[in-house]
Image (cartoon, rainbow, N blue to C red):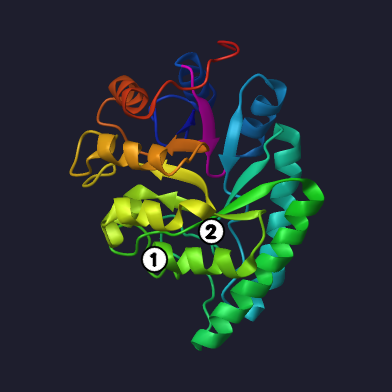
């Protein structure tokens, strides 16, 4: 059975972070997040009963330009120390720094061969770090049409080919069904094609990036496709809900029973 997590950056947004987390856990879900200040990390560290399923493992430098590589790898190592503190063994990889409005602001080499060879080499080095620290990374594609202008991995295939070429069980694909629908659609065939390398799944509906069941994606059909491929990893709701509690209920109804909360903290 899949485990379910909820992004604490997007749900119960009117509440302070600690209260958001408590509400998510009380409803029976693990949490995930993007980036948090030290005070929020300290809160999570002080409550090991809160299951942190994943967070972004670097938001600086670039895997697509030689001049951004060392900054990127330093960022990866720094976030690994947070993963250890939070007992989190699965992290998200993006290609480099994302700006405050969601835009990609990191360096991207002009020549395609330089871009792809650099990314391949960087991910190989990240795989070595992952092996050393016993973690798994999932590389994320992001849409460029609505949310993340200039991001260099807009299509699922872009990220998938890199993951396949690196060939490490420590580097997987983050299949974000919201981003895939915005950028290209064809979700069920995409799930079937890349199921063998998927390490994490994100869901939200289109348009609006609200909770599943509010838009054009037939999420019950998509959920069945995931089950049919044998995917048993985490499914994370990374949506901006129209109604927070209804969103959690819909998420659970579509994708199955979430984790049992260990404590109301």
166 in magenta: no
In the image, 25 versus 260, the foreground residue is 260
User: Toward which corner of the image does residue 251 lie, by quadrant?
Assistant: top left
Residue at image location 54% in from the left, 23% down from the top: 18
Mark closest to the chain's N terminus, 2 or 1? 2
In percent of width and height, residue 205 lies at: 27, 42
User: Toward which corner of the image does residue 145 lie, by quadrant?
Assistant: bottom left
In percent of width and height, residue 88 lies at: 67, 36
Q: Which residues are magenta?
A: 28-36
In the image, 58 versus 211, the foreground residue is 211
Residue carrying label 1: 154
- Please tell me whether residue 133 is drawn above or below residue 61 in the rendered image: above
Horizontally, is 182 left or right of 34 in the view? left
Kind of element beneath mark 1: loop
31 in magenta: yes
- Please tell me whether residue 114 is drawn above or below residue 172 in the rendered image: below
Kind of element beneath mark 2: loop
In the image, 198 versus 153, the foreground residue is 198
Q: Do the CB atoms of the residues marked 2 and 1 lie less than 8 Å apart? A: no
In percent of width and height, residue 35 lies at: 56, 44
Residue at image location 35% in from the left, 49% down from the top: 177
Distance of label 2 from label 1 (alpha carbons): 11 Å
Residue 210 in view (yes/no): no
Disc number for residue 218 = none
Residue 217 in view (yes/no): yes
Disc number for residue 94 = 2
């Amino acid at each position: 059975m899949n485990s379910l997590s909820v992004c604490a950056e997007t749900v119960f947004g009117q509440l302070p972070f600690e209260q958001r987390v408590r509400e998510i856990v009380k409803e029976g879900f693990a949490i995930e997040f993007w980036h948090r200040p030290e005070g929020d990390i300290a809160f999570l560290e002080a409550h090991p009963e809160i299951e942190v399923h994943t967070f972004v493992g670097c938001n600086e430098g670039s895997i697509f330009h030689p001049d951004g590589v060392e900054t990127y790898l330093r960022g990866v190592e720094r976030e690994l120390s947070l993963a250890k503190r939070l007992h989190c063994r699965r992290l998200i990889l993006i290609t480099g720094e994302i700006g405050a409005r969601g835009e990609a602001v990191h360096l991207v080499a002009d020549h395609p061969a330089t871009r792809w060879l650099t990314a391949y080499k960087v991910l190989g080095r990240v795989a070595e770090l992952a092996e050393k620290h016993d973690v798994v990374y999932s590389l994320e594609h992001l849409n460029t049409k609505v949310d993340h202008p200039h991001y260099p991995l807009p299509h699922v295939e872009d990220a998938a080919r890199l993951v396949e070429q690196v060939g490490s069980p420590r580097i997987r694909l983050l299949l974000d069904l919201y981003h895939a629908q915005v950028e290209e659609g064809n979700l069920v065939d995409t799930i079937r094609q890349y199921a063998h390398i998927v390490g994490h799944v994100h869901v939200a509906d289109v348009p609006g990036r609200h909770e599943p069941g509010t838009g054009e994606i037939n999420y019950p059909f998509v959920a069945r496709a995931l089950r049919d491929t044998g995917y048993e990893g985490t499914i994370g709701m990374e949506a901006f809900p129209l109604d927070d509690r209804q969103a959690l209920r819909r998420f659970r109804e579509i994708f199955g029973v979430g984790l049992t909360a260990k404590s109301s903290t």
